Amino acid sequence: MGTTTTYDLVDTIHTPENTGEANPYEITPMKPHTFWPDPTATEDTTFLIWAHPNPDDMDERMDRLFFQSLLLYLSDISDGKEQMSILQIMRMQ
C-alpha cells in the first residue's frame, strides 16, 4: 500500500521490507495523509493500524471522533455486518 503525506504530498510505498514490525510507519497527529493501493501489487493488501491517542486532550480534537468512527466501522466489518471499503475509511479523515 502507499501513503501520501504532508502538504507537500510525499508519496511512499510500504512493503514488509521497508515498513514492518521493526520499522513501523508513524503518522503524527494532525499530519495530512491518505492511503491508497499500490498499483503494482500482485496480491491482496493487509495493513495493521495501531492508534494510541492521548485521552487527556481527546474531547477537543478530531482524534476522538475519527478513532471512534474507525473502530466502530472495523468492528462492523469483523462481525460481517459491512464489507470493507477503502473509500469509506478515507472519507473518515
Image (cartoon, rainbow, N blue to C red):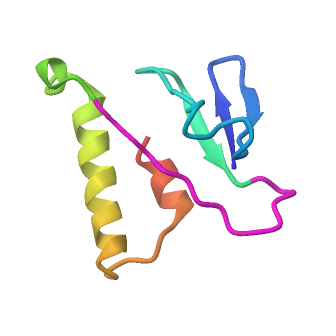
Residue 45 lies, in percent from the top left, at 65, 61
Which is more toward the observer, 78 or 65? 78
Residue 36 as seen in the image, left or right of residue 30: right
Is 74 a magenta residue? no
Q: Which residues are drawn in magenta? A: 38-52
Q: Residue at x 45, y 77 (%)?
A: 83
Which is more toward the observer, 20 or 88? 20
User: Compared with residue 63, is residue 77 higher up or lower down, i.e. above or below?
Assistant: below
Q: Residue at x 29, y 32 (%)?
A: 52
Name the outermost residue toward the front: 22
Magenta residues, dominant SS class: loop
Which is more toward the observer, 71 or 17? 17
Q: Residue at x 46, y 54 (%)?
A: 89
Name the outermost residue toward the right: 40
User: Compared with residue 28, is residue 75 higher up or lower down, i.e. above or below?
Assistant: below
Residue 61 as seen in the image, left or right of residue 32: left
Residue 12 as seen in the image, left or right of residue 66: right
Q: Quadrant of the C terminus?
A: top left
Is 40 a magenta residue? yes
Q: Which image quadrant for residue 30?
A: top left
Q: How many discs mark residues in the rendered view?
A: 0
User: Compared with residue 23, is residue 73 higher up or lower down, i.e. above or below?
Assistant: below
Residue 30 as seen in the image, left or right of residue 70: right
Residue 51 lies, in percent from the top left, at 35, 37
Residue 73 lies, in percent from the top left, at 32, 62
Residue 85 lies, in percent from the top left, at 51, 66
